[in-house]
Amino acid sequence: MNISYPSNYYSMKEKVVIITGASSGIGRALAYEFAKQGSKVVIGARSHEKLTEIAEEIKLKGGELAFVQTDVSVEQDCKNLILTAVERFGKIDILINNAGISMRAIFEKTELLVLNKVMDVNFWGTVYCTKYALPYILKEKGSIVGVSSIGGVKGMPGRAGYSASKFAMQGFLECLRIENMNKGLHVLIAYPGFTATNIRNTALSSDGSQQGESPRDEQKMMTPEAVASHIYHAIKKRKNKIVLSSKGKLIVFLNKFLPNWIDKMFYRELAKEPDSPFK
């Protein structure tokens, strides 16, 4: 299988990069990282105010950026985001499906609307954006990225809907990679561990309301900037997957050989969280 790439492919300068969920956390850090490297960035998120703030900061530093207020659970919003990138910059090289929402409650007590909402954002948002971006990315032999989680390789108690959505994302993107393996498409799935972002503060409780304060110590977590840097370099190297944090790598490794022990370890650790649903 011989696939030729442009001579400057591994340079991110002039690449057109779409990032969803870019108003905070990993998405925001990715926008700054790619803009710093000379990429043309198109960002989408639900907060118009935050998108405007990021756009102004990047443009002041000489970066090229466009933004679209986007709810990735709405198919038309995803289509508009993709078309804006093409209309503004003429192509798409990279799509980073980063938008996500979490939840924290045991399944027995969780209303189904919570799982529906999580799947709509985490899984269907990825599907919608990828569907409309794929023809343009194939033309450039570019990259599609899914920002998953350790919860996407190991089911996390108290986060059934979240883990299910990330497992679904993984299956979808792996199929996409294989279907297009002769067309030069690069597919990366990134698995961060617990990261100091807003996603836990906005995580849904059993009735769909936001939980508010995070139950975990953010000082012990990886920063969004560190995660963004790892993802940036993994795209440049066209890796298939990256597992971030030593703890995350250990969980993935041990789960292959000691799955029952990992199950008990997960339960014990998450049961220690303040206001744990297991108490």
Image (spheres, rainbow, N blue to C red):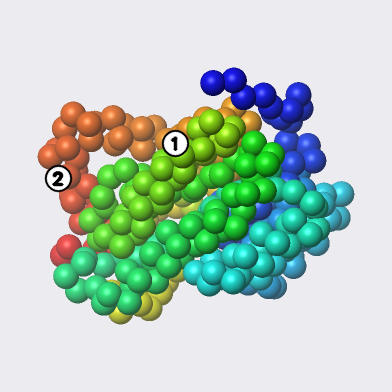
Kindly indicate the quadrant of the structure image that contains residue 79.
bottom right
Callouts 2 and 1 close, C-beta under 8 Å? no
Kindly indicate the quadrant of the structure image that contains residue 173.
top left
Q: Is residue 254 visible?
A: yes
Residue 168 horizontal side relative to residue 49, left or right: left
Work out whether residue 266 or residue 85 is closer to the camera in this orientation and state it: 85
Number of marks present in the image shown: 2
At mark 2, the secondary structure is helix
**Disc number lying in front (2 or 1):** 1
Residue 212 x %, y %: 42, 71
Tell me which residue sits at (37%, 46%) in the image.
171
Residue 255 horizontal side relative to residue 4, left or right: left
Q: Is residue 73 above or below residue 220?
A: below
Please name the residue that numbered disc 2 is placed on: 264
Q: Which callout, 2 or 1, points at the residue further toward the start of the chain?
A: 1
Q: Is residue 18 above or below residue 255?
A: below
Residue 178, disc: 1
Q: For the C terminus, which image quadrant? A: bottom left
Residue 262 x %, y %: 19, 40
Three-letter amino acid code of the residue under disc 1: Ile
Residue 51 x %, y %: 69, 66
Mark 2 Cα shell of 10 Å, populated few (<14), some (14-19), many (≥20): few
Tell me which residue sits at (41%, 49%) in the image.
172
Residue 226 horizontal side relative to residue 152, left or right: right
Residue 277 x %, y %: 21, 66
